[in-house]
Image (cartoon, rainbow, N blue to C red):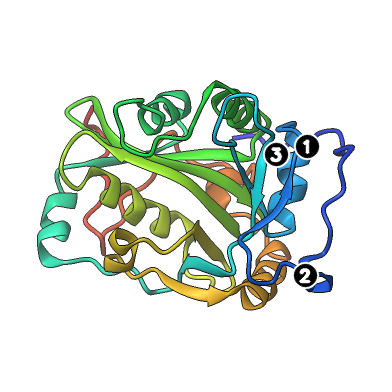
Amino acid sequence: MPAPIEPEPSRWVFADLRQRTGDLLDDVVAMGADLAPGTLLAAYRHGIFPMPGERPRDPLVWFSPVRRGILPHGGLRVSRSLRRSARDFEIRIDTAFDAVVAGCADPRRPMGWIDDRFRAAYGELHRLGWAHSVEAWRDGRLAGGLYGLGIGGLFAGESMFHRETDASKVALMGLVGVLGDDSGRLLDVQWATSHLRSLGVVEVDRHDYLDLLDEALRLPPPPVWSGSPVPARTPTIPDLGVGRPGRG
C-alpha cells in the first residue's frame, strides 16, 4: 500500500480546544465548513470529527466529546465464545472499503447518519491512503467490518456493521492486531456506547484525550498502511485466532 498523500490544506481553521472555555460542557464545538480531505485531516488532528445536521441542508456539525470513548492498549475484552467464533472468519485490510462503508450506511440500520456526502468524502480519503477498512470475511463473503482514519498512531473509528453474528467484533479484534503492541497508539471510538463498553471501551476527559492524541500523532503509522511492504491479506493473528490465509 502506498504511503498516504497529504491533500491541499483546508481553507478552514480549527481552534485549539485547550484554549476554549465557553463550550467545555458541550460535545459540539463547531458548525459549517466542508468535507474536503484537508479539512477532515485537520479536524481529526485537532480531536474533532463531523456528522451531518438533522436535515439535508443543515450545516455540518463538528464534535469533540467532553467524555471521549477509547479502547485502551491491551483493553479489548475477548470472551471465550468470541474467540471460538473468530476462527471462522478471515481478516482482510482495505480490500472492500466502499462495500464496508455501504454496509455501515445501510438505511435500514437504526440511527443511520452516513449519507452520500460522507461516503464520497471518506472514499476520497481512502484513495489518498488515510481511511481504511478492516473486514471480516467468511466463505468468500463480506460478513462485517469497520472503517476509520489512520493518522500516525491514531485510528479514529467511524462505524462498524455485521451481516453475521460476531463479524464486526472480529473486525475489531483484527484492528487491534494491526495496531500492534505500541502503547502510544490511540484507538478512538468517539462515544462509549454500552455495546462498546462490553468490549473494553472506556471514557476519558477531553483534555486527557487531546494529550493522548498528541502522543499518538507523533508515532509512525502501522506498517500495514504506512507504505511498507505487506502481504495482500493480513497475516494470521494467532493469539486471537483470526485470519485464515487461503480462504475466500
* 147, above or below 185, in the image: above
Evaluate whether residue 207 shows in this view.
yes
* 159, above or below 185, in the image: above
Residue at (38, 39) in percent of width and height: 111
Residue at (28, 59) in percent of width and height: 195
Q: Which residue is mark 1?
A: 33
Evaluate whether residue 135 shows in this view.
no
Q: What amino acid is found at the position of numbered circle 3 in the picture?
A: Pro
Q: What amino acid is found at the position of numbered circle 1 in the picture?
A: Ala
Label 2's element?
Answer: loop
**For residue 117, side relative to residue 147 (left or right):** right
* CA gap, disc 1 and disc 3: 23 Å
Q: Nearer the viewer, residue 167 or 116?
A: 116
Label 1's element?
Answer: loop
Is the residue marked by circle 2 packed among few (<14), some (14-19), or many (20+) residues within 10 Å? few
**Among numbered discs 3 and 2, the one appearing first in the sequence:** 3
* CA gap, disc 3 and disc 2: 36 Å
**Among numbered discs 2 and 1, the one appearing first in the sequence:** 2
Is the residue marked by circle 3 packed among few (<14), some (14-19), or many (20+) residues within 10 Å? some
Label 3's element?
Answer: loop
Q: Quadrant of residue 248?
A: top left
Q: Which residue is mark 2?
A: 22
Residue 24: horizontal and vertical position, in percent?
69, 71
Residue at (75, 38) in percent of width and height: 32
Is the residue marked by circle 1 packed among few (<14), some (14-19), or many (20+) residues within 10 Å? some
